[in-house]
Image: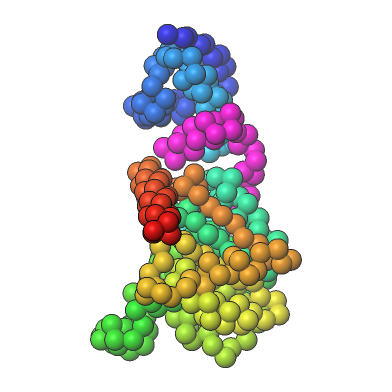
């Protein structure tokens, strides 16, 4: 059993560090298998040597969070632990202090992980950005935030939000209402992000003025999109032909963000994903950036990260079994 003492000084808000009802401490103790106590702003960490050393590094990161003026929550604790375990440490200043946008509640929207920071920087510095990663990494949300900021700053004249309607045809036709009613269920995640940034009334006002357009991908064909911020969501469900069609719509003064999760392709069997093909075809072209987000960048409930990791492990094992069975057939 090892014991480490950390003098956090009088400048650190011990209540903010510990959390309401010591919730932050309890989470650290659970995840790192240690015990934490405090006396006169000197923390005592008890546990196995490796665990208390990790805890010390994590607590140093959390103190940096407080010094930046941010609150500590479960996501920040889990991310700090992940970075310490993988890299031995993490300088919170690497995330920067940039506010991407402000939501309807007046809260600033900032990046929460290094992967998100690289993604947002890529959007700022490139014409076309591919954001590829699992659910909960903020791919669409951050793209929408950047789009709204660009529109407010008059960097673009309009925002265009699109995604493929994978079930276009019979199922779409049987939905009640006009065209907008039929495609709304497919575009709902994009609406949610816009409502968060602009509010329902603000979003409707921009739509009436033609400054925000939400449409299925099929309606992009034949158009040239100038001075626009274009977001293609769920791009893993595009075909190669649809992806090429979309990317060649981009006109002067426009930017495009393409988001998707290549592990969740819903196309019929035998259909290739346009997003996967784009990775192979467009890599290395100037002004096009591919940003790969991972389970470390998940900012939803902590269980989401565990679920993603478990499925990744399962898929890799399945591929190995498939490869072995193929090898056996070849030998026969």
Counting labels gives 0
Pick whichever, 256 or 280, lies toward us.
280
Residue 114 shows in the view: yes
Give the left or right position of residue 5, taking residue 118 as reference: left
Q: Residue at x 46, y 61 (%)?
A: 261
Q: Quadrant location of the N terminus?
A: top left
Which of 183 and 268 lies nearest the eye of the viewer?
A: 268
> Can you give x and y, in whole percent of width and height, for residue 186 in the image?
37, 74
On the image, the x and y values in percent for residue 199 come to 43, 66
Instruction: Name the residue located 57 percent from the left edge and 91 percent from the top edge.
Output: 222
Q: Is the magenta stretch mostly helix, strand or loop?
A: helix
Give residue 256's quadrant in the image. Answer: bottom right
In this image, 240 relative to 309: left or right?
right
- The quarter of the displayed image where residue 323 is located: bottom left
| Magenta span of residues | 71-99
Residue 256 higher or lower than 294, as above or below: below
Q: Is residue 268 above or below residue 102?
A: below
Residue 51 x, y percent position in the rendering: 46, 20
For image coordinates 52% across by 19% down, the residue present is 53
Residue 147 within the segment the image draws in magenta = no
Spot occupied by residue 134 in the image (x, y as percentages of width and height): 45, 55
């Amino acid at each position: 059993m090892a014991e480490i003492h950390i003098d956090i000084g009088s400048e650190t808000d011990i209540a903010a560090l510990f959390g309401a009802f010591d919730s932050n401490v309890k989470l650290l103790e659970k995840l790192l298998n240690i015990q934490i106590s405090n006396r006169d702003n000197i923390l005592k960490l008890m546990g196995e040597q490796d665990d208390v050393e990790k805890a010390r590094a994590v607590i140093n990161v959390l103190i940096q969070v407080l010094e930046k003026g941010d609150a500590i929550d479960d996501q920040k604790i889990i991310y700090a632990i992940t970075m310490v375990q993988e890299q031995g440490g993490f300088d919170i200043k690497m995330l920067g202090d940039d506010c991407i946008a402000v939501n309807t509640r007046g809260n600033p929207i900032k990046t929460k992980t290094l992967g998100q920071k690289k993604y947002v920087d890529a959007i700022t510095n490139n014409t076309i950005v591919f954001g590829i990663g699992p659910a909960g990494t903020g791919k669409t949300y951050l793209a929408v935030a950047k789009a709204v900021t660009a529109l407010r700053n008059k960097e673009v004249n309009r925002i265009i939000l699109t995604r493929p309607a994978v079930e276009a045809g019979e199922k779409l036709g049987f939905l009640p209402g006009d065209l907008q009613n039929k495609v709304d269920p497919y575009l709902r995640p994009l609406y949610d992000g816009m409502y968060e940034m602009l509010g329902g009334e603000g979003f409707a006002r921009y739509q009436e003025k033609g400054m925000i357009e939400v449409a299925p991908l099929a309606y992009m064909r034949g158009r040239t999109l100038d001075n626009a911020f274009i977001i293609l969501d769920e791009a893993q469900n595009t075909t190669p032909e649809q992806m090429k069609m979309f990317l060649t719509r981009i006109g002067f003064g426009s930017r495009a963000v393409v988001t998707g999760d290549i592990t969740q392709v819903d196309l019929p069997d035998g259909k290739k994903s346009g997003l996967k093909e784009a990775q192979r075809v467009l890599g290395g072209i100037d002004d096009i950036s591919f940003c790969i987000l991972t389970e470390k960048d998940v900012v939803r409930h902590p269980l989401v990260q565990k679920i993603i990791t478990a499925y990744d492990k399962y898929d890799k094992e399945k591929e190995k079994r498939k490869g072995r069975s193929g090898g056996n057939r070849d030998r026969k």
